Image (cartoon, grey):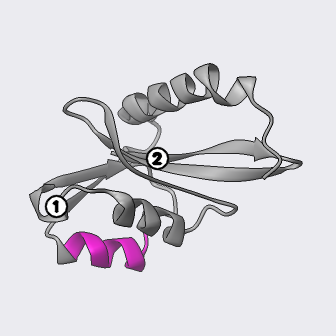
Amino acid sequence: MSDLTYVKVGHHRNYICAWLDLNNREIIGYSVGANKTPELVLEAFRSTQIDLRKINLFHTDRGNEFKNVTIEEVLNTFEIVCSLRRKGNPRDNTVAEATYKTIKTDFVHTMTFST
């Protein structure tokens, strides 16, 4: 599962893209950057130490940073089935949202990031 969230850095937003293993809710890959782009998602793919050939299903929301040719090519290369959140059902991404809430509550909100 993957999703994006933002963190305030100076006077701008930066984004975190995390890959979560739904089996144990472990973050298995992540990336950070100034823009919500397919490249940010691709960098999270690259950061994981897990053999992508062992992943069967990739679930995320319907954002353009996930639903595009770049990400589809990676998923097809490793024969990973893409599962997109159903329209109007934000509960499909509850695990990712809960993970980001924990990160923000325990870490981000207590910090001021200049870079």
Residue ID for mark 2: 3
Q: Which residues are magenta?
A: 67-76
Q: Residue 11 placed where, x, y %?
A: 89, 48
* Residue 31 magenta-highlighted: no
Query: Is disc 2 in contact with disc 1, using a CB cutoff of under 8 Å?
Result: no
Q: Quadrant of residue 92?
A: top left
Q: Residue 110 placed where, x, y %?
A: 73, 23
Closer to the camera in the image, 10 or 36: 10
Question: What residue do we see at 59% from left, 20% from top?
Answer: 106
Closer to the camera in the image, 84 or 31: 31
Residue type highlighted by circle 1: Asp
Q: Is residue 30 above or below residue 113?
A: below
Question: What residue do we see at 36% from left, 62% from top?
Answer: 45
Q: Residue 15 placed where, x, y %?
A: 63, 52
Residue type highlighted by circle 2: Asp
Question: What residue do we see at 17% from left, 71% from top?
Answer: 78
Q: Secondary structure at mark 1?
A: loop
> Residue 91: in sight, yes or no?
no
Find residue 90 and name its label: none
Q: Is residue 77 above or below residue 99?
A: below
Density class for disc 2 (Cα within 10 Å; few <14, some 14-19, many ≥20) is many
Residue ID for mark 1: 51
Between discs 2 and 1, the one toward the N terminus: 2
Q: Residue 48 placed where, x, y %?
A: 32, 56
